[in-house]
Structure formats: structure tokens, C-alpha cells
Amino acid sequence: MSWLRSTPPGLLLAVLITLLRLLVIDIDPPVRDLTDYLPKDEGFYVFPAYDLYERGDAFVDHPFRLTGIPTITNVGAYLGLVVFGDNYLGLRFGSVLFALISLLCFHSLLARITTDRLLLNILPLIMVSDLSFGFASILVEPTIARMAMMLVTMLWLDRILRPTPNTIGLFMHGAGSALLVLLTYPTNAFVLPACWLAIAMITFQAEGGYKRSLRAVSSHVVGVVSGITLLLGLIWLLGYNELAQTAVTGKNFEHRVSLSPSGLFLDLYSMVQANIFRLNPALLLIFLGSAFFLFRRPVRRWSPALIIVAAFTIVFFAQTAFINDYPTRKLVILLPLALLVIAGSFEHSLEADPRSVRGRWIGWTLALILITGLLGQILLYHKNASFLSAQVSPALLPGIVIALVVVALLLFRRAMEPASWWNARWVLCFLLVPGTWNSVRSMIIEREYAYADFMHSLRSYDGAVFIGAASMGFRTYNDIVPRLNPYVLPGGYNDQWPVLERMAIEDTTTNYAVGYLDDMVEFQRIGFHEDRITVLNIWETMHENVFVVYKEKR
């Protein structure tokens, strides 16, 4: 049990919190202004896993394709369904495992960046207390798998490069990272150039000379090409044309590409609006301040793990500026990167005696950031009735007290002199407060089960065929048979109504569908009749009319 005694208590508590979320794994997603997420999204992401579990074939109504399908997420969902059955525990259990992998890999990287006990204890707790991370860990949200695979790749690369990189190790990492990208999601492609940048920086610092650095990067690139070729070759031998499906998938991302200056700026600005920053402005400000302090230090003094974190952060921002497939909820993938940058900054730049001039300047800067974050939170959410009911969250009060204590220590020199225990790192404790309050309120105090109840009510339709995009997300707790749209990609709303009309005309059986209130007019236009309406009350602030419609046999 020596490993248990040497493990930071903060990490153990963070693991416990992640596991305890299994107790609320069947709750509804929060209000849409927080996550922009609905049950039908979960159905889109794992329709192959559900079809394989219920119908014995992962691609019953759609040609086989790997690109654009979150394969690793589907594997987790399928295993959960097999073990725990057709319920939210089975569907979402894989997300909890990915959250645990993310947490453990994050802490392993953190330990390679800093040895400070406070940082090793507090940063994992900040990570798991974040509302976006909490919901990503219990919803079928591919971003938690993206995060896990990104952190696995980073940790693996750090081990390959210690103490000195070797050609075979870099080749194997290249092939493995390529497979992880293809099996996770296309927009995790930033991982590959991030690896190349990190390898170039580390090998140049360690060995010197561009030739050795270029040789190391080339070994990794060859591995990437080999990994991609191997996977596509195996798929081709099985009789599938993945390249053709890749071309179709590419069209689904075209509208997300930005090449104009204004588009690039808006995409970068959208990252500032990520939920992890929107719900905790102080985190954004401390992250930006930490990046500023960190990049003032010579790169040669950085640890390899910190160089890897910096490379991944830079390349992620660069990719997202051009191809923004990360809406506010999906940007939770930035959370571990931001916290690791903060850790590196405190390790390298902020370890000054708080009684010194430099320590006071740093202290004032952080106090200003802290107070600005508090004011920013008040301004952002004072009018957001759906979340704070037009009141300042009680979670702000502890942060205000901490800010006043910091300012008092800075104002009174005599009070500072005996306070050698005080260090700027303690300001990070404030970041726990908003995340903890938001998570407790959303996931415990005001949790709802309306979607699960609605799916239970669909048992009266067991065996019936359901068509339409929304129907894919309401197949848990019942045995309805959703038919995936065979003519367009799942979730392709531009052609939804013509395709539904075509499916209803071609099918001689009675077709049912699930829809939301705004869909009723279109359903009536193509000949569907209202069968049942259920009002879902989410936190008593949003009312979603989810209904069942049907079209009689011809």
C-alpha cells in the first residue's frame, strides 16, 4: 500500500468524485444555454454501438464508415450496454472510464511538470469540479474520449523522449497516435502536428542541430503514414471503401472551415467563450496570465512534459482558428491544457518570496486577476435567469473573501513579513469554488430525469419503427426500432424533411417519429399525425415539447 500513501490526497478525492458521478448517471443534460446538448446528440454519436447491441449489425441502415464515427466512444458504449443493459448506466459508463483515464494521465503529466504538493493536490480537484468536465464524464460526449486519447498521446510521447529519443520508439508512437486520431474523431488531427512540434523542440534542445531534430520528426511522420495506411488497408481487405466514405464525411466539415481574417478571429474568440471559461472567468484570466509569465522564461529551462503541453496548446488554438468543430461544450478539452500551463507557470515564474518586490508585484497581478474574474462572473450571469435566477451566485462569496485576504496581505507590509507561508499558488484554490457550486447545483440539487421518464413511456411502442433524426436519441429504456437516415449522414439536418418524406413514402409500414415543438409544422406537412405530447420541465426554466407522431400505412 505504499503507492496509496505516496498518492496525493487531492488525486484520490478527484478519483472518488468521478466514480460517485455514477450515482447520477441517468440525469438529464443541463439547460441548453450551458451545454447546447440534447439526448438525440447521444444517439447520433453511438448509433453503431446501439444497432450492434440491439440488431446485431453496427451499420444496418447506413454504409460502413470509420471516418467521422467516434469509434472509441462507440466501443465504450457497446461494452457498457453489454455489461449493464439498455439503460443510462450501460450507455454512459464508457464516458466515466474515459474521464478516469483523462484524470490519471493529467496527473501523471502534472507530476512531470511540478513537484509542488499544493499544485499536485489542487489542480486535479479543479479539473473534476468543473461543470463541463462533470457532464462530459456522464454523457455520451466524444470530447471526453478526445481528451483521454490526447492525454494518453502526450504522456506516451513524454516517456518516448526520456531520456533520449530513439527511432523505433518515435515510429511506433507515430503509428499509434495516428490510429488513436482515426479511431477518436477527425478533428483530433491537431495531435499529430503537435507531436511534431514537440519532438522538434525537445530534440533540438537536447541534442542540438537541425539534422537530428529533422530525423526525429521524420521517424514520427513515417510512423503516422504507416499507421494510416495499415488501418485503411485492413478496412479495404474487409471489402469496404473507406476513402469514399471519407470524402463524404469531409463535406460535413466544409462549413466549419474559416479562411478569412474575420472568421479566424471569431473562431479564436469562440474559444474564450468556452464553458470552462464562461462559467469561471478567473480560470481564463489566470490561464492567459500564466501563459504570459511562462513564455518569458527560456524554453531550454522547460521540462519535456511542459514543452509537450505548450506544443499541444499552440497547435490546438491554430487548428481551431481554421476548423472550428469545438462548440462551447466541446472545448472542455482545453481544461487539462490550461491547468498544465498554469502549473508550469507557477513552477517556473511565480516561485518568488511574497515579501520581495517581485513577489508583491506578482501578488498584486494575481489579486487583480482574481477580482476581475469575480466582477466578470457577476456581469456575465446577473441577467441569466435560466441559471442564476438574476441573483449573484453564493459561490462568489468565498472568492470575494479570498481576494480581500490577498489584498490585505499585500497592503500591510508588517502583516506580510511573518506570513512566509503565504504563496501566490493559494489563489488557485478560488478556482474550486465556482466549479464546485455549479456542479453541485446542476448535478445534485436541481437534477432532472424528464428524458429518462419520457423514454420509459415509449415502451408502449416497443417493436415499432421510428424514423427521423431525434428518434435516434430516445431508444434507451425501450425497444423501439429507430431507422437511421440512409440517404444523408446522421445529423444532416439540411435534408432532413425531404428524406423523412421519402422514407415515409417508400415504407409500407406505419412510421412513427419523435420530434420537438418546432418540428410539428413540418411533420404535419409531410402527412404525420400527432399521437402524444409530453412536456419536459428542465430546472423549471425551459419547457421542451417532445412528442410522438405517426403516419398510417398506405
Image: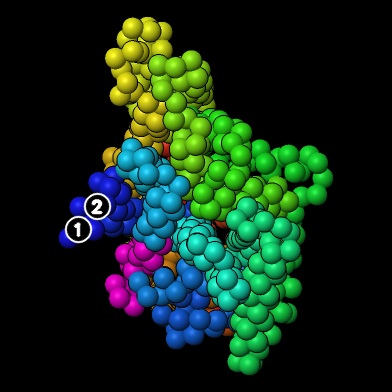
Among the 4 quarters of the image, the one containing residue 385: top left
- Give the distance between the C-alpha atoms of the residues marked 2 and 1, in whole angstroms: 6 Å
Among the 4 quarters of the image, the one containing residue 540: top left
Which is more toward the observer, 58 or 457?
A: 58
Q: Position of residue 251 (x, y in %)?
A: 74, 66
Main SS, magenta residues: helix
Residue at point 65% right, 87% down?
233
Quadrant where the C terminus sits is bottom right
Is there any visible trace of residue 389 in the rendered image?
no
Q: Position of residue 384 (x, y in %)?
A: 48, 29
Outermost residue, left side:
1
Residue at point 26% right, 52% down?
7
The correct choice, above or below, for 143 with respect to 174 in the image is above
Quadrant where the N terminus sits is bottom left
Residue at point 47% right, 30% down?
350
Which is more toward the observer, 299 or 97?
A: 299
- Asked whether the residues under the numbered discs 2 and 1 touch, taking CB atoms below 8 Å apart as contact, a structural biologist would say yes
Which is more toward the observer, 341 or 443?
A: 341
The correct choice, above or below, for 465 with respect to 435 in the image is below
Q: Position of residue 487 (x, y in %)?
A: 67, 75
Q: Amino acid at mark 2?
A: Ser
The correct choice, above or below, for 535 with respect to 484 in the image is above
Is there any visible trace of residue 317 in the rendered image?
yes
* Element at label 2: helix
Q: Left of 525 or right of it: where is 9?
A: left
Q: Amino acid at mark 1?
A: Ser
Residue bearing mark 1: 2
Q: Residues within 10 Å of mark 2 (few under 14, many from 20)?
A: few
Residue at point 41% right, 70% down?
77
Q: Which residues are magenta?
A: 81-98
Please tell me the numbered disc located at residue 6: 2
Q: Position of residue 6 (x, y in %)?
A: 24, 52
